[in-house]
Amino acid sequence: MSEDRLSRAAAAGVRARSLLEDDLLQGAFSALEERYLQAWRATAIDDVAARETLFKAIHVIGKVRDHLGSVLSNGRLAERELRELVELAERKRRFGIL
């Protein structure tokens, strides 16, 4: 992967970490999840369509969290690769291998 792509992935990882640690966003996720669960429990027995819609909504919240976690993990890997590239360039410079 190019250094530019690694840098963008690392920056996205930092932003994802910030979002995952943000109390307001996590509170919003929790509040929505709770509302959807309450609405799901309150559906009429024959209202299959409403239950399906609420089920999907609850799962979307989890998918967003999972996606942010994936971006965070990819960012950490990108940071590690960037550090390795810098270390390799430094070793080459030290030993005159350019």
Image: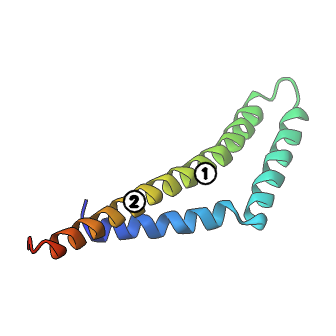
Residue bearing mark 2: 80
Left or right: residue 71 versus residue 49 is left
Left or right: residue 70 versus residue 49 is left
42 is higher (above) or lower (below) than 26 = above
The type of residue carrying mark 1 is: Val
Residue at image location 80% in from the left, 29% down from the top: 47
Q: Position of residue 52 (x, y in %)?
A: 70, 33
Q: Which SS class for mark 2?
A: helix
Of residues 3 and 65, the one drawn nearer to the viewer in this rendering: 3
Residue at image location 18% in from the left, 75% down from the top: 94
The type of residue carrying mark 2 is: Arg
Residue bearing mark 1: 64
Residue at image location 76% in from the left, 36% down from the top: 50
Of residues 51 and 68, the one drawn nearer to the viewer in this rendering: 68
Residue at image location 16% in from the left, 70% down from the top: 92
Q: Quadrant of residue 43?
A: top right
Left or right: residue 33 versus residue 92 is right
Of residues 98 and 75, the one drawn nearer to the viewer in this rendering: 98
Q: CA distance from mark 2 to mark 1?
A: 24 Å
90 is higher (above) or lower (below) than 46 = below
Q: Would you call the spot at circle 1 few (<14 residues within 10 Å), some (14-19), or many (20 or more)? A: few
- Tell me the quadrant of the picture where the C terminus can be found: bottom left
Q: Nearer the viewer, mark 2 or mark 1?
A: 2
Q: Would you call the spot at circle 2 few (<14 residues within 10 Å), some (14-19), or many (20 or more)? A: some
Q: Position of residue 67 (x, y in %)?
A: 54, 50
Farthest residue in the front direction? 95
Q: Position of residue 73 (x, y in %)?
A: 49, 52
Of residues 59 and 81, the one drawn nearer to the viewer in this rendering: 81
